[in-house]
Amino acid sequence: MYEVNADDDEVLARLTGVHRRRGAVQALEGIDLTLPAGQVTALLGANGAGKTTAIEVLLGLQPADAGQATLFGRTPFDGDAKARVGAMLQQTQLPERLTVAEMLALVRSWYATPRSIADCVALAGLDGLMSRRYGRLSGGQQRRVQFAAALCGRPRLLFLDEPTTGLDIEARQQLWRAIRELVAGGAGVLLTTHYLEEADALADRVVVLDRGRVRMSGSAAEVRAQVAQRHVACDTHLPDAEIASWPGVQQVTRTGPRVAIIARDADALVRRLLQADAALVNLEVRRAGLADAFVQMSAADHDREAA
Ligand code: ATP
């Protein structure tokens, strides 16, 4: 029933039409998701969109009510499939009294061919922490130990549920480097994050979940292109209301002489601005980041719901 198809050999895990109810909430409503080897897939979505539920179904921590979840072509409840997975979840409980060195030794003992301690330390940035008790570490340091625990069994597929929450900039960059190294070695990664620049920086594919459904998927660039938004700023005396009345202008905000405009077509907007105000200065145009795109989608939802 769970055989791997010949053309599927690079697909590590898959959700097909998965539904999952949590209490009164339909947490997943017919989700399709494919996790290929050698790629980072970023799962984005507002709080409660269903990201953790999707991961837990793929990890066999909860069943699908309908549809099918497969891990290495098998059911996610299969022990051999689970052994090839590493996971760093939001609520990870590790023994507080163990030192980091003892913890790594314990987790490594679960695997036949674990990653070397030196590699775990280097990848997770644990230098100087090995003799410290886990329970006495800062939140960010504990997150790094959890990352080391997730990768020390040489997983083919790594689930990272908001891995950089609470990490400082340096630790976050270190984790990004480690993820890139693991993926270059052929691992697949499913990453959920609220730091949208993280998806921009890391993800080969972005899947946007919205109330249990896949709302959008593609490369980070494709997701941005779908919302096709540009930010234009300049110093101008033109009235805000006049700019706001032009076609394609979505938002106008002003701070003193400087006006910030969100528009669909930056070229047309810039031409019109320069025509209307010959004294206009300090013109700046930038592409919307994924963060802006995401906020725009959520705002559009609220507008539709309010209408
Ligand atoms: P976050 O970004 O906040 O982590 P998420 O996208 O991971 O959110 P889930 O944790 O998958 O979202 O939750 C999806 C929905 O299921 C939410 O509406 C949530 O309230 C609901 N839910 C999750 N766990 C339970 C539970 N144990 N009992 C009832 N409802 C639950």
Image (tube, rainbow, N blue to C red):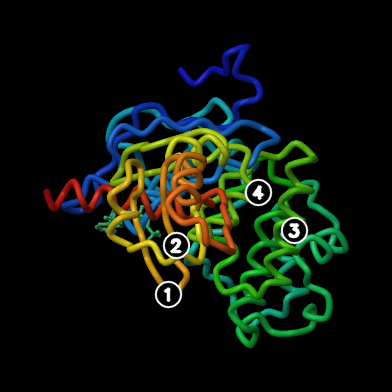
State the separation of the CA atoms marked 2 and 4. Answer: 29 Å
Q: CA distance from mark 3 to mark 2?
A: 53 Å
Helix or strand or loop: what does disc 4 sit on? helix
| Residue at far top of view | 6
Residue shown at the point (42%, 51%) measured from the top left: 276
Q: Earlier in the sequence, mark 2 or mark 1?
A: 1
- The reply to whether the C-beta atoms of the residues labelled 3 and 2 are less than 8 Å apart is no
- Describe residue 136's horizontal placement relative to residue 28 as left or right: right
Discs 3/4, front: 4
Whether the residue under disc 2 has CB within 8 Å of ligand 1: no
Ligand 1 quarter of the rendering: bottom left
| Amino acid type indicated by mark 3 | Arg
State whether residue 221 is above or below residue 97.
Answer: above
Q: Nearer the viewer, residue 255 or 195?
A: 255
Q: What residue did someone put label 4 on?
A: 202
Question: Image check: 288 left or right of 251?
Answer: right
Disc 2 is placed on an element classified as strand
For the residue pair 63 and 235, the one nearer the viewer reads as 235
Residue pointed to by mark 2? 260
**Mark-to-mark CA distance, 2 and 1:** 8 Å
Q: Could you say which quadrant of the image residue 47 lies in?
A: bottom left
Q: Which residue is mark 1?
A: 255
Circles 2 and 1: CB distance less than 8 Å? yes
- In the rendered image, the residue lying farthest to the left is 307
N-terminal label among 1 and 4:
4
Query: Residues under labels 3 and 1: Cα distance?
Result: 56 Å
Give whichever of discs 3 and 1 has the lower sequence position: 3
Q: x%, y% of residue 178?
A: 76, 55
The residue lying at 60 percent from left, 65 percent from top is 164
Quarter of the picture containing the N terminus is top left
Which residue was labeled with disc 3?
108
